[in-house]
Amino acid sequence: MRFFKVTGVAALTLLPVLANATGFGIGFGVNPAFRTTVTPLDDGSFRVATQGSSAAIAYWCGIGDFAIRTLGLPTTQRIYVSKPYDKKTRTVQFSFTAPEGADTSKSYSITVSRVGENMSASGAQSHCFDNIMDFDF
């Protein structure tokens, strides 16, 4: 019986720590695993910058999470790359309308290097907890 009491106390003590864990792809808590900054631009698009990672999923995570949790858009809202990844500034621009003349056909790759690449807001936000290879201790 003492074992169960000690285990229960230990679990309750560690619960707040586990709630903030982001390593090994565990998505406890409400914060995305990737740290991004989303800046609204005058033309209606959004510039996304990441901290620490320049993986495509980090940019998609940032805009998807922003669209759903900050702007309150529906999870089915399409998000489009309006300006591809810029190596100098490490940013990507997204919009909620298809860029004129861009190829917006469905693709199975996750990239931010092609104008017109798109996915739903929920699909983009789902990448926020894809950090299994990041080992963010």
Image (cartoon, rainbow, N blue to C red):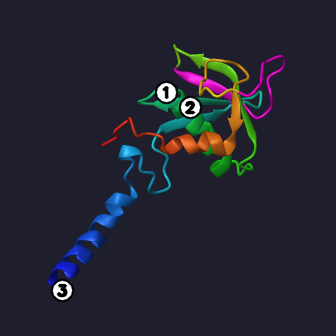
Prevalent SS, magenta region = loop
Q: Circle 2 is placed at which residue position?
A: 59
For label 2, the crowd category at 10 Å Cα-Cα, with few meaning under 14, some 14 to 19 and many 20 or more, is: many
Question: Residue 55, labelled with which disc?
Answer: 1
**Residue 13 x/y as whole percent:** 27, 69
Callout 2 amino acid: Tyr
Callout 1 amino acid: Ala
**Residue 30 x/y as whole percent:** 50, 55
Callout 3 amino acid: Met
Q: Is residue 62 left or right of residue 11?
A: right
Residue that extends furthest to the left in the rendered view of this protein: 2
Q: Which residues are magenta?
A: 90-106
Q: Is residue 132 left or right of residue 32?
A: left
Residue sitting at x 83%, y 16%: 101
Residue sitting at x 34%, y 40%: 136
Q: Secondary structure at mark 3?
A: loop
Q: Are marks 1 and 3 in contact (CB under 8 Å)?
A: no
Residue sitting at x 49%, y 46%: 32
Marks 1 and 3, Cα distance to the nearest angstrom? Answer: 49 Å
Q: Circle 3 is placed at which residue position?
A: 1
Instruction: Using the image as rendered, state which of residue 133 and residue 69 is in the foreground.
Output: 133
Seen in the picture, residue 97 relative to 20 is either above or below; the reply is above
For label 3, the crowd category at 10 Å Cα-Cα, with few meaning under 14, some 14 to 19 and many 20 or more, is: few
Q: Please tell me whether residue 40 belongs to the stretch shown in magenta.
A: no
Q: Is residue 134 left or right of residue 7?
A: right
Q: Please tell me whether residue 95 belongs to the stretch shown in magenta.
A: yes
N-term mark: 1 or 3: 3
